[in-house]
């Protein structure tokens, strides 16, 4: 998929990737983070999980110190690399790929779960649970 268009010349490569059980995908996600408090907020890194229609797509960790002044926002880029082979077996990822390749306006729910961490005396302490963000997405929003 390039510029919102499905490239049919890539289908033989996809078939070979499926036989090898290695369907790599890279994506760049820009996450806007807002600090609504009256004090400066900071984290040292965070774990994330990404799902579409309740089907897990990726998880990882971003090790980037982030400091946001009171009542300000910052954009955090997240580079995601994943192997879609296992996910391609489920209906959720197939719905996601159909939504990407269609101009029909199909929508789905993209879920981002974040677990921030702060470092104290060289040791990381993670927030006890994930902060969950659900966003309705379509091809128009993604490209």
Image (cartoon, grey):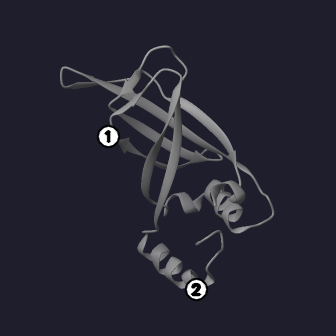
Left or right of residue 4: residue 77: left
Precedes in sequence: disc 2 or disc 1: 2
Q: Is residue 21 above or below residue 11?
A: above
Q: Bin the neighbour count of mark 2 within 10 Å (Cα to Cα): few under 14, some 14-19, many 20 and up.
A: few
Residue linked to disc 1: 63
The residue under the point 66% across, 47% down is: 53
In the depicted view, which residue is nearer to us: 73 or 21?
Answer: 73
The residue under the point 52% across, 77% down is: 14
Q: Quadrant of residue 83?
A: bottom left
Q: Is residue 44 above or below residue 93?
A: above
In the depicted view, which residue is nearer to us: 47 or 57?
Answer: 47
Q: Position of residue 139 (x, y in %)?
A: 69, 59
Left or right of residue 60: residue 14: right
Q: Nearer the viewer, mark 2 or mark 1?
A: 1
Q: Position of residue 97 (x, y in %)?
A: 64, 63
Left or right of residue 34: residue 62: left
* Mark linked to residue 27: none
- Please identify the quadrant where the C terminus is shown: bottom right
Helix, strand, or loop for circle 2? helix
Residue linked to disc 2: 9
Q: Is residue 9 above or below residue 113?
A: below
Q: Position of residue 103 (x, y in %)?
A: 77, 66
Q: Is residue 134 above or below residue 11?
A: above
């Amino acid at each position: 998929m390039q510029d919102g268009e499905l490239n049919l010349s890539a289908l033989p490569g996809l078939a070979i990737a499926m036989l090898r059980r290695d369907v790599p995908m890279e994506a760049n996600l820009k996450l806007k983070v807002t600090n609504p408090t009256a004090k400066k907020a900071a984290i040292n890194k965070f774990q994330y999980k990404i799902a579409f229609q309740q089907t897990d797509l990726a998880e990882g960790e971003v090790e980037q110190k982030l400091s946001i002044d009171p009542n300000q926002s910052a954009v955090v880029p997240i580079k995601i690399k994943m192997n879609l082979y296992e996910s391609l077996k489920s209906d959720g990822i197939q719905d996601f790929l159909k939504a990407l390749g269609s101009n029909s306006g199909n929508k789905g729910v993209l879920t981002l779960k974040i677990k921030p961490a702060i470092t104290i005396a060289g040791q990381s302490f993670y927030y006890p649970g994930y902060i969950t963000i659900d966003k309705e997405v379509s091809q128009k929003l993604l490209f």
